[in-house]
Image (cartoon, rainbow, N blue to C red):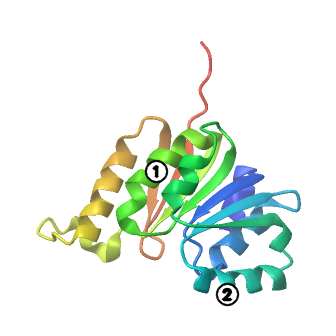
Amino acid sequence: MTLLVQFAGARTGIEIGTFTGYSSICISRGLGPDGHLICCDVSAEWTSIAQKYWEKAGLAGRIELRLGPAIATLRALPRTEQFGVAFIDADKGGYLDYWREVVPRMNPGGLIMVDNTFSHGRVIDAGNDNPVVIAIRDFNDHAAADDRVDLVMLPIGDGLTIARKKVLTEE
């Protein structure tokens, strides 16, 4: 993830779902010493672990934790292009709403990474009516059809979707 963030040249980022902080450390390192990452999570317990690791990694000054529902945090942000990178790895039922809030806030050329988009292979089982699987399927269909981004799903872990917000040019 660090390398992908570096490739994107991002200096600002948002992470939806922080847990114990591993991905936020990877992202923050990629943003560089002048970078800033906003982390959204609902768990003070788990993010307290993340904060300890941010300190140990020397990144605490570059990472801002916002506790509360991520959708509320996103909607409270200005609806302007402000992020070079976003990572979504939270409650799967919220992915589509997160996407709808994140994409308009991405800089042109910005990188969006979404974890667990294979849902352990269950997304291709048409008979699987688990609500989480349906939510991931709906997200995948929506993201793949979104003409604001170029997108690929990679078979890394449980599926990683990587999207790049298109750079619009005047003709």
Residue 24 placed where, x, y %? Answer: 67, 71
Q: Which residue is mark 1?
A: 99
Image vertical order of residue 57 relative to residue 118, above or below: below
Of the two numbered discs 1 and 2 in the rendering, the one whose residue sits closer to the viewer? 2
Using the image, tell me which numbered label, if any, was put on residue 12. none
Q: Quadrant of residue 56?
A: bottom right
CA gap between label 1 and label 2 equals 26 Å
Labels in figure, total: 2
Question: Counting residues from the N terminus, which is met first, the one under dot 1 or under dot 2?
Answer: 2
Residue at the (46%, 50%) spot, across then down: 99
Label 2's element? helix
Q: Amino acid at mark 2?
A: Ile
Q: Quadrant of the N terminus?
A: bottom right
Give percent across and percent down for residue 165: 56, 41
Task: For the residues labelled 1 and 2, say whether their Cβ atoms are less than 8 Å apart.
Answer: no
Q: Quadrant of the C terminus?
A: top right
Residue in the foreground of this view, choosing between 160 and 18: 18
Kindly give the residue lying farthest to the left in the view shown: 127
Residues packed near mark 1 inside 10 Å, few (<14), some (14 to 19) or many (20 plus): some
Rendering coords of residue 167 (x, y %): 61, 32
Q: Is residue 87 above or below residue 142?
A: below
Disc 1 element = helix
Q: Is residue 116 left or right of residue 162?
A: left
Q: Amino acid at mark 1?
A: Trp
Q: Which residue position is annotated with label 2?
A: 49
Toward the top, the furthest residue is 171
Q: Position of residue 110 (x, y in %)?
A: 63, 45
Q: Is residue 48 left or right of residue 134?
A: right
Q: Is residue 127 above or below residue 97?
A: below
Closest to the observer, 129 or 109? 129
Residue at the spot 64% in from the left edge and 58% down from the top edge: 14
Q: Is residue 85 above or below residue 107?
A: below
